[in-house]
C-alpha cells in the first residue's frame, strides 16, 4: 500500500464516522499560513477563502472543516510506514504557521502501516496537538480510537473558536496529554 492509497481510505473512514451535516473531510486542500498587508494597505492574498499553494498557503493531507462556511478545524498530516526527524520538524513548523492564521485549529500526525509513534516525535514536535499510529487504514468496531481523537480535536477547535467569536471571558484553559503505551 502507498501513502496516497492509505490517505484515500482513511479519508473515507473519517467521513463515515463524522456528521456530514456539520463537517466536510477534504484531501490535498491548501490552507493559509500567512496574511500580509501590501504597500497599498491591501490584504494579500486578496481572497483568503481560496488559498493557492505558493501564495501563502501549504497543502494539507486531510482537512476537516465546518460544513456551513469551510472554516478549518482539524488538519491531519499522513505518513506511511514511519516518519523521519525531518518530517516532524517540517510538519510541526507548518502546524505552527497555520495556527498563526487560525489559532483555534488542531493539528495532528497519522502514521499508517505501523503501530507506534517513535521517540523522535516527542523530541522534535512543537506544533502538533496529537499523533496516532494505525497499522491498517480500515476502522472497525475495535479500532475507533482514531475517530474518538478526531472528534475530541474538533470539539477542542470549536471551544477555542467560540472564545474568539463570542469574546468570552474564560476562567481556565487546560490541555490534557493522553499517551497509550504499547
Image (tube, rainbow, N blue to C red):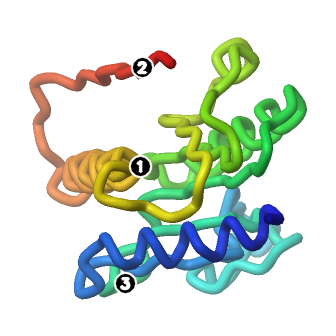
Image quarter of residue 96: top right
**Residue identified by numbered label 2:** 179
Image quarter of residue 23: bottom left
- First along the sequence among labels 2 and 1: 1
In the foreground, 162 or 35: 162
Residue at the spot 55% in from the left edge and 67% down from the top edge: 10
Rendered position, 7 above or below 128: below
Circle 3 residues within 10 Å: few <14, some 14–19, many ≥20:
few
- First along the sequence among labels 1 and 3: 3
Are circles 1 and 3 on residues that touch, CB within 8 Å? no
Q: Secondary structure at mark 2?
A: loop
Is residue 12 in view from this perspective? yes
Asked whether, in this view, residue 51 is left or right of residue 175, the answer is right
Instruction: Indicate the quadrant containing the N terminus: top left, top right, bottom left or bottom right.
Output: bottom right
Circle 2 residues within 10 Å: few <14, some 14–19, many ≥20:
few
Q: Secondary structure at mark 1?
A: helix
Q: How far across and how far down the image is residue 142, in percent?
A: 32, 49
Spatial CA span between label 3 and label 2? 33 Å
- First along the sequence among labels 3 and 2: 3
Circle 1 residues within 10 Å: few <14, some 14–19, many ≥20:
some
In the foreground, 117 or 72: 117
Residue 146 marker: 1
Asked whether, in this view, residue 102 is left or right of residue 61, the answer is left
**Residue identified by numbered label 3:** 69
Amino acid at each position: 500500500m502507498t501513502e496516497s492509497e492509505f490517505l484515500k481510505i482513511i479519508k473515507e473512514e473519517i467521513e463515515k464516522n463524522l456528521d456530514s451535516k456539520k463537517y466536510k473531510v477534504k484531501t490535498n486542500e491548501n490552507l493559509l499560513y500567512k496574511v500580509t498587508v501590501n504597500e497599498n494597505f491591501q490584504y494579500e492574498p486578496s481572497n483568503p477563502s481560496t488559498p493557492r499553494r505558493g501564495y501563502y498557503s501549504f497543502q494539507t493531507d486531510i482537512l476537516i472543516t465546518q460544513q456551513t462556511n469551510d472554516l478549518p478545524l482539524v488538519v491531519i498530516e499522513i505518513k506511511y510506514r514511519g516518519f523521519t526527524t525531518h518530517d516532524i520538524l517540517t510538519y510541526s513548523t507548518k502546524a505552527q504557521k497555520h495556527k498563526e492564521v487560525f489559532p483555534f485549529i488542531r493539528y495532528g500526525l497519522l502514521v499508517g502501516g505501523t503501530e507506534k509513534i517513535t521517540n523522535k516525535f516527542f523530541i522534535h514536535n512543537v506544533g502538533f496537538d496529537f499523533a496516532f499510529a494505525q497499522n491498517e487504514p480500515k476502522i472497525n468496531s475495535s479500532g475507533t480510537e482514531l475517530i474518538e481523537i478526531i472528534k475530541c480535536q474538533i470539539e477542542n477547535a470549536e471551544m477555542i473558536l467560540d472564545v474568539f467569536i463570542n469574546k468570552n471571558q474564560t476562567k481556565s484553559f487546560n490541555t490534557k496529554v493522553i499517551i497509550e503505551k504499547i
